[in-house]
Amino acid sequence: MRNDNALEVTNLVIRYGDVTAVDSISFNARYGEVTAVLGRNGAGKTSTLESCEGVRRPTEGVIRVLGADIATAGNTLRARLGVMLQDGGIAPNARVRSLVHHYCTLHGRGGDADGIISKVGLTERTSSTWRRLSGGERQRFSLALALAAEPDIAFLDEPTAGVDLDGREMIRGIITDLVHRGCGVVLATHDLDEAERVAHRAVVLHHGRVVLNDTIEALCTNGRRLEDVVREVTR
Amino acid sequence: MKLVVAQWRMELTNLVRNYEQLLLILVIPVGVLVFFGNVDVLPETMNLSRLVSSVLALSLMSTAMVSTGISTGFERSYHVLKRLGVTPLGRTRLIWAKAGSVTVVELMQVLVLVIIATILGWSATDASWWRVAGALVLGTAAFAGIGLSLAGRLRAEANLAAQNGLYLVLLSIGGVIVPVGELPARLSTVAQYLPSGALSEVMYTSLGGESNSSLGAWIVLAVWAVVAPFVAARLFRFDG
């Protein structure tokens, strides 16, 4: 029987020298839901996501992704992860079609590069390099690489940063599609309005600790906005 | 294997599209060979055989150290390595793909340079190609180790400056263009322990030249081929 949790983070600690960026946090993210990891700059969002992706080795704690310990993750698990890094991870001379196609090959999950490019609205820019794209197009290019995995869990770090309204709507639609096909989406964002629209659950970090962990529905009772709730606990 | 081949093709495509890298790995070695093969400005002992072996050493240094080091440094700073590290490719396959790409470029360089040297009047009849292959393997390990040690720690811009600076130093006083024996005494003592001087010497004897210091040069090169990758493995950070 499948566990409902696509991600299980238990007592995660991340230290950089003497600085504790993440201080013993625990939370889960379910399949078919968007879990928003929220907090101010330096709250530990990106460190947490990068540990979950397997980029960063945590100081302490256990992270289970799709039921397996990420510390010992093999290629089969990595093939199922969609990752969108905050800083892109794309070379300036990389061309849209060639790199998306390459990532489809690397993940080997039958992802259709042209279909993905069309989904993120870059069909007219297939031969453009990263350096020639606008900020919003770069975000969508980066998102396309995450989609190349046909992911069962997607880690998206600030996917709407620098994206215009149309682009946001497109990204929101893509996230909704992922959720509809049962993918667990873990989203780190500063954009609380976006989180309120798209997420099912919010995990709020403050100084490396979880200060709120609940469904959006439960947090935004009596007409309260998520922004007000988060501001209150991260003051 | 499929993933390594896919990444290897991507590495080669990126290289072909990067004109600065092509200048470094092809235009400069060919230019040095053609220029010094026709203009009589080098010491008398720097005959065509010496020049060919030196230019082969130079081309290997360009590819394994400078080209690999600079491109890897920039990939690190753009977080390309970090991004690839979370795909099924992983770090080990990425390194194999890079090694495969360097090997192809080096074989292409040897082919082009040997053809040009033959046109200039050099004969490969006395060459031991097995020993040349051994020199290429050791030299690649040594110089890739040096290049990646710098690329794995320095910021991209500092790495770029360091790789180019080291390239010029080794080119001019590292026993590449001017043989170790022709350098001033103090420089000569240092140069014989440098991988550049050792590789030139090893390449010279492998191509049929005679030298008293061949065994020493093989030992020096072998030591660099072990130590430099070890240091690189210890220093290298995938995340810039």
Image (cartoon, coloured by chain):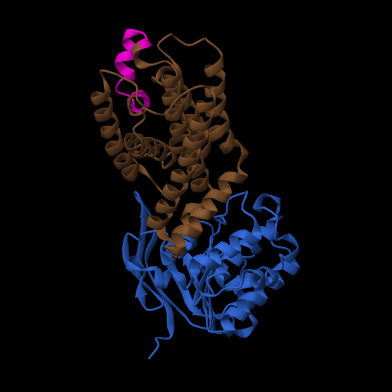
B5 shown above or below B133: below
| B10 with respect to A44 (left or right) | right
Q: Position of residue B201 (x, y in %)?
A: 34, 23
Coordinates of residue B206 in the picture (x, y in percent):
33, 29
Among the chains, which one is brown?
B
Q: Which residues are magenta?
A: B182-204
Front-most of A221 and A135? A135
Location of the N terminus of chain A by quadrant is: bottom left
Residue A156: % across, % down: 55, 67
| Residue located 36% across and 24% down the image | B204
Q: Measured along the vertical axis of the image, is residue B195 above or below residue A86?
A: above
Residue B152 position, x and y percent, is 41, 42
Judge from the rendering whether residue A179 lies leftward or rightward of residue B212; answer left or right.
right
Find residue A77 and report its image quarter.
bottom left
Q: Which residue is more in the foreground, B68 or A176?
A: B68
Whether residue A190 can be seen here: no
Task: State the count of labels.
Answer: 0
Tint of chain A: blue
Magenta highlight on residue A206: no
- What residue lies at 49% left-to-right and 82% top-to-bottom? A31
Residue B45 vs residue B177, the one in the foreground: B45
**Residue positioned 34% across, 33% down in the render:** B128
Q: Decide if residue A142 is on the left or right side of residue B41.
A: right
Is residue B184 part of the magenta span, yes or no? yes
Asked which quadrant contains residue B197, the reply is top left
Residue B117 seen in the figure: yes
Identify the residue shown where x is 49% and y is 69%: A107
Magenta stretch: dominant secondary structure: helix
